[in-house]
Image: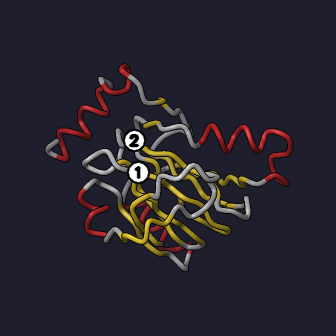
Amino acid sequence: MKAYWYDKSDADQRLPHDSGRPVPETTLESIGVLYSHHPQLSTVDDLAKERNYKNRDEITVSPQAMGDVYESKVKMFFHEHLHEDEEIRYIRDGAGYFDVRSEGDDWIRIRLEKDDLIILPAGIYHRFTTAEDNYIKAMRLFKDEPKWTPLNRGEDTDANQHRAAYLTQRGS
């Protein structure tokens, strides 16, 4: 995992956009983002049990796996949004970026690779993209039935109860 402040250039979203200004893991923790490295699947199983994640699936995001819809899906994942549940991703192969909003509403880019696991709290604004090689395989973990419902940023989501709870927990 590598985290840093996002370089706001207009270049392709799949490029690193590395500002050269690193973000320490403690800053991620302060906004509720949890990171861990799991070379053994058994430790992910332990975490799932500990956090009551009952379901999981795997997704491969690549042109080969998704065909003609790949580009539109990657663009859709890159729209700023939130979820009403935690977002948990365990990277099985490849690499990608999760961008999360900081306390000051700036973007923090987090590069994840094989064996990295990230937990984003419900209500945090974020987005996702693959890295330059256009390939990532991830396990998605869910507390209940698998669902992935993005709520794009806007007035309605700014007033969403899960967004409000997130901000309250962070003292914002």
Picture residue at 76% right of the left edge, 54% below the top: 62
Marks 1/2 in contact by CB < 8 Å: the verdict is yes
Mark 2 lies on residue: 125
Residue at the extreme left of the image, as rendered: 171
Residue 106 in the image: x percent, y percent?
Answer: 34, 49
Q: Up-down: is 86 above or below 130? A: above
Q: Amino acid at mark 1?
A: Val
130 left or right, relative to 170? right
In the image, residue 167 above or below residue 19: above
The location of residue 67, given as percent across then percent down, is 85, 45
- Closer to the camera in the image, 28 or 42: 28
SS of the residue at dot 1? strand
Position of residue 70 measured from the top left corner of the image (x, y, whole percent): 77, 44
Provide residue 2's location: percent of width, then percent of height.
46, 72
Q: Nearer the viewer, residue 19 or 35?
A: 19
- Earlier in the chain: of badge 1 and badge 2, it is 1
Amino acid type, residue under disc 2 in the picture:
Tyr
Q: Which mark is residue 172?
A: none
Residue drawn at (60%, 58%) of the image: 139
- When the figure is inspected, residue 72 is found, relative to residue 38, above or below; the finding is above
In the rendered image, which quarter is residue 158 located in? Answer: top left
Q: Which residue is mark 1?
A: 100
Residue lying furthest bottom in this view? 39
Give neighbour class at mark 2: few <14, some 14-19, many 20+ (Cα, 10 Å).
Answer: many
| Picture residue at 68% right of the left edge, 52% below the top | 59
In the picture, measured across the screen, residue 52 lies left or right of residue 42, that is left
Q: Name the quadrant containing residue 146.
A: top right
